[in-house]
Image: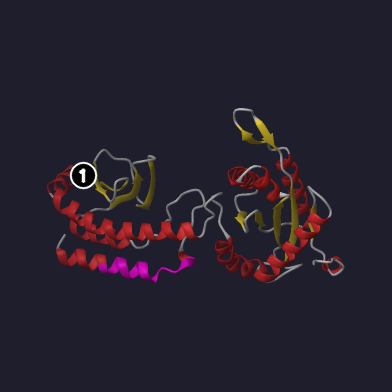
């Protein structure tokens, strides 16, 4: 591959990455990598096909520390073959990018072997561009996530809601918002410490992630408050049933305070429910109505939920 071709590819790749908007990103909740490279790497596939008759190439990141790998580009016409050559480029102490090329036949395999050094040089140049983008996305992910629970934060919620509200309104579907607050959370900090407080937060976040559907999201909205977004909810009764299930499940969930003495803490939560578009049709109104509903639930005691009702809310003294 000539230097001109390498430079042309690099320029095209960088230009494409600049033009990627946030709406084009497909964020994977379970993995740290963000799959944003596939479209851009078609440039690489075309260049390699023209220069070396390469039809099948797979590209993946590999984290040597935790043995985690994830494809960032995978050929659609991939087949199992023994004529496979891999090119490994170390990007840092732990991160490696692997190019796996399947040869068309033994003659082609030999050609690739003979041009190994040229291909390695090409991949080395390309890899740094990809890695820089990978680091940018890791930083972006950190800014959108709560560092204690690993859940998305309010910043992500606003980006997320901006997309789904208009879609749900167009399709005439309801969304339920469950604002969850831990009863007497400050007392946990006062009695124990922030470390135990973090255990309570992590315990609740894990329960919420396991209890909701994969199509729903859980967000840490404040220091001790969470918001569950339930898409395409059938009716308010479904939201109430889930709220009660969450309340009962968390009340039964033990939190070990001291491993040596096996001292155990049980906590309770309250939930405020707001429905879109019944109770609110903007992000600001959703946050306000769900917050007011949570306030009323806590007014009624522990382990309670309250469905926002505009008429009833006007009778509540909020101050």
Q: In the picture, residue 122 is in which quadrant?
A: bottom left
Can you name the residue that lies furthest to the left here? 114
Residue at 34% x, 45% y: name it. Answer: 62
Left-right relation of 236 to 44: right
In the image, is 27 to the left or to the right of 196? left
Camera-nearest residue between 192 and 65: 192
Image side of residue 196 versus residue 24, left or right: right
Image: 146 above or below 102? below
Span colored in magenta:
11-23
Specify the quadrant that holds the C terminus: bottom right
Q: Is residue 234 above or below residue 254?
A: below
- Name the quadrant of the N terminus: bottom left
Residue 169 highlighted magenta (yes or no): no
Name the residue: 58% across, 66% down.
Answer: 158
Q: Residue at x 54, y 54 (%)?
A: 146
Front residue of 40 and 229: 229
Question: Pointer 1: what residue?
Answer: 105
Q: Is residue 275 visible?
A: no
């Amino acid at each position: 591959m000539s230097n001109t071709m390498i430079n042309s590819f690099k320029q095209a790749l960088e230009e494409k990455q600049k033009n990627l908007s946030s709406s084009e990103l497909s964020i994977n909740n379970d993995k740290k990598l963000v799959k944003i490279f596939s479209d851009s790497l078609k440039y690489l596939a075309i260049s390699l096909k023209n220069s070396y008759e390469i039809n099948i190439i797979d590209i993946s990141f590999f984290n040597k520390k935790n043995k985690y790998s994830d494809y960032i580009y995978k050929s659609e016409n991939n087949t199992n073959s023994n004529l496979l050559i891999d090119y490994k480029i170390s990007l840092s102490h732990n991160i490696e990018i692997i190019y796996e090329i399947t040869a068309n036949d033994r003659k082609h395999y030999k050609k690739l072997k003979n041009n190994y050094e040229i291909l390695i040089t090409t991949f080395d140049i390309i890899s740094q561009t990809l890695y820089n983008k990978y680091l940018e996305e890791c930083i972006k992910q950190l800014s959108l996530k709560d560092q204690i629970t690993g859940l998305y934060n309010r910043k992500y919620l606003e980006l997320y809601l901006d997309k789904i509200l208009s879609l749900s309104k167009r399709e005439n579907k309801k969304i339920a918002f469950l604002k969850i607050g831990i009863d007497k959370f400050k007392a946990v900090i006062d009695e124990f410490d922030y470390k135990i407080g973090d255990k309570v937060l992590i315990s609740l976040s894990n329960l919420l992630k396991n209890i909701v559907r994969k199509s729903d999201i859980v967000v840490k909205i404040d220091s001790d408050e969470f918001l569950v977004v339930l898409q395409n909810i059938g009716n308010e009764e479904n939201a109430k049933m889930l709220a009660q299930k969450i309340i009962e499940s968390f009340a039964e969930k033990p939190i070990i305070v001291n491993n040596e003495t096996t001292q155990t803490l049980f906590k309770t939560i309250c939930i405020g429910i707001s429905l879109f578009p019944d109770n609110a049709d903007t992000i600001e109104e959703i946050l306000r109505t769900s917050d007011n509903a949570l306030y009323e639930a806590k007014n009624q005691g522990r382990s309670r939920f309250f469905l926002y009702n505009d008429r009833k809310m006007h009778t509540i003294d909020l101050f």
